[in-house]
Image (cartoon, rainbow, N blue to C red):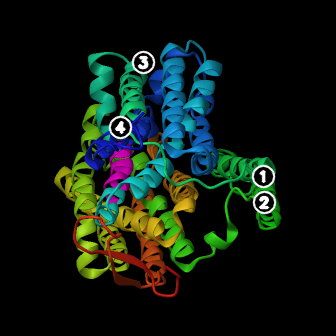
């Protein structure tokens, strides 16, 4: 690993972090378009094969904050490498899987890779010049969302040229390369938080997340009013209350509830939840809309590759918007950038809901969506990192990413219920189902915009460089009512 006396240039560090985040983000969605293929190859049922997604989602939701906390304690660089190693191991197991048990186990192991996001944010804050932190955090946050969309775009061409096993082989190769590069080029963490992991809060966190996400993922199948779904929701509430109580009383909490109550933290987390509702629902259902035969009165009868390409504009514009969000935030403020992103997102959902008769309308809608979400994700991540002490960067950013994923689960479940509520001829959803579903997502983003207005206004202060250090003064942004 890089020595303390000669630290790696921050641009090299960024390239390594970006490779690791890209591998994790791709694995979020690469398998989504080919679940039917996996179902046939592994001789399983449609309800069982959905666990290829659910297991990964549950595991990532649990391990994201835990790995962030471990990184804060023992060192972000070494935990980043370990997290990538787990991601590579899970990819290897998935590529070799011959039955569903091995595949689901592999996806659980891959979920440990969720820790790359909080660890990457923490490393950026530790290693980058202060004036570069906002832009780098924004770019990595956007890359995580871009990768999720790009996975759907790439899945079809990869399967057509090779087979679905390469959906795991290729990310494994990228992950191993990133892990090796991180070991040699990413400096060891100069910022540590003395302490230990409190395992009771970790168990309770895992339990309520499992109950919540399982209820959300199965509600469209079991029914929202079924005893099992209601029981899981009740269990999630009770376990979450117990988790908060234990965290508040713990001397070494896994997640500091005082930190989570900071206005700059909880408001951004609320916005992340609602934006997650919109983004992941579009990723899941827009390709299905495009694949629907035109005989149904809508849709274009596209194959996997063609339907994935509908999302290509969003991956381009999301990345570009994320790269430019830092400069825009310095001009108009990060809070305003988040609000602008939500408003642009509303426009895109309205396009999907009311202007979907031609493919060019959908391409336009996804391009607009990418701009909105790219701006919002980048600015939110920067606000979170700037609102907490360096020792809490990993946990705070990990929970923000986690809450966005939970929002995605809520959005996908609600969308599934709305779209399939009134099936048409042949069992296909009616066009009105998609219209109502996308309109619901526009409503969620409208609430996100309202939540964005509650984000504290950041004060810009000039920081004097340390004695003997070169360079000009730089600016720092913190909520006006927070201490420096």
107 w.r.t. 191: above or below: above
Magenta: main secondary structure equals: helix
Q: Mark yes or no: residue 244 visible.
A: yes
Q: Which is nearer the N-term, disc 4 or disc 3?
A: 4
Badge 3: residue crowd in 10 Å (few <14, some 14–19, many ≥20): some
Badge 2: residue crowd in 10 Å (few <14, some 14–19, many ≥20): many
Q: Which is nearer the N-term, disc 1 or disc 3?
A: 3
Q: Secondary structure at mark 3?
A: loop
Residue drawn at the location 35% of the way across and 52% of the way down: 140
Q: Which residue is mark 4?
A: 151
- Residue 21 in which image quadrant: top left
Circle 3 or circle 2, nearest the eye: 2
Q: Which is nearer the N-term, disc 3 or disc 2?
A: 3
Q: Secondary structure at mark 1?
A: helix
Q: Which residue is mark 2?
A: 243
Q: Secondary structure at mark 4?
A: helix
Residue drawn at the location 38% of the way across and 31% of the way down: 184
């Amino acid at each position: 690993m890089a020595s303390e006396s000669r630290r790696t240039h921050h641009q090299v560090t960024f390239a390594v972090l970006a490779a690791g985040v890209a591998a994790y983000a791709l694995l979020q969605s690469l398998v989504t378009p080919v679940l039917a293929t996996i179902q046939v190859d592994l001789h399983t049922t449609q309800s069982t094969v959905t666990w290829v997604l659910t297991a990964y989602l549950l595991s990532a939701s649990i391990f994201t904050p835990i790995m962030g906390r471990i990184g804060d304690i023992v060192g972000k660089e070494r935990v980043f490498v370990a997290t990538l190693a787990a991601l590579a191991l899970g990819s290897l197991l998935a590529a070799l899987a011959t039955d569903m048990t091995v595949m689901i186990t592999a996806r659980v192991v891959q979920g440990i890779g969720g820790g790359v996001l909080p660890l990457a944010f923490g490393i950026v804050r530790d290693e980058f010049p202060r004036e570069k932190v906002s832009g780098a955090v924004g770019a990595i946050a956007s890359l995580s969302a871009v990768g999720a969309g790009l996975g759907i775009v790439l899945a079809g061409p990869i399967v057509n040229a090779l087979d679905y096993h390469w959906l795991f082989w290729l990310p494994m190769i990228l992950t191993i390369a990133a892990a090796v590069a991180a070991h040699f080029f990413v400096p060891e963490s100069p910022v540590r938080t003395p302490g230990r992991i409190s395992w009771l809060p970790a168990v309770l966190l895992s339990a309520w997340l499992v109950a919540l996400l399982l209820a959300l993922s199965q509600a469209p199948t079991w029914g929202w009013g079924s005893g099992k779904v209601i029981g899981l929701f009740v269990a999630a509430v009770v376990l979450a209350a117990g988790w908060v109580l234990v965290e508040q009383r713990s001397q070494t909490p896994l997640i500091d509830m005082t930190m989570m109550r900071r206005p700059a933290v909880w408001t951004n987390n609320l916005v992340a939840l609602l934006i997650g509702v919109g983004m992941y629902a579009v990723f899941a259902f827009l390709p299905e809309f495009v694949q629907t035969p035109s005989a149904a009165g809508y849709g274009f009868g596209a194959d996997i590759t063609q339907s994935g390409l509908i999302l290509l504009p969003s991956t381009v514009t999301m990345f570009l918007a994320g790269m430019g969000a830092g400069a825009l935030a310095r001009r108009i403020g990060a809070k305003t950038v988040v609000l602008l992103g939500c408003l642009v997102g509303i426009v895109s959902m309205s396009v999907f809901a009311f202007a979907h008769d031609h493919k060019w309308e959908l391409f336009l809608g996804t391009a607009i969506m990418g701009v909105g979400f790219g701006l919002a994700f980048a600015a939110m991540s920067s606000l979170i990192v700037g609102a907490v002490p360096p020792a809490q960067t990993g946990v705070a950013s990990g929970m923000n990413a986690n809450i966005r994923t939970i929002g995605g689960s809520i959005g996908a479940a609600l969308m599934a219920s709305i779209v399939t509520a009134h099936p048409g001829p042949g069992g296909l959803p009616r066009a009105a189902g998609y219209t109502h579903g996308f309109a619901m997502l526009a409503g969620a983003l409208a609430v996100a915009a309202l939540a964005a207005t509650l984000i504290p206004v950041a004060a810009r202060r000039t920081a004097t460089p340390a004695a003997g250090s070169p360079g000009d003064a730089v600016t720092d942004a913190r909520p006006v009512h927070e201490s420096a």
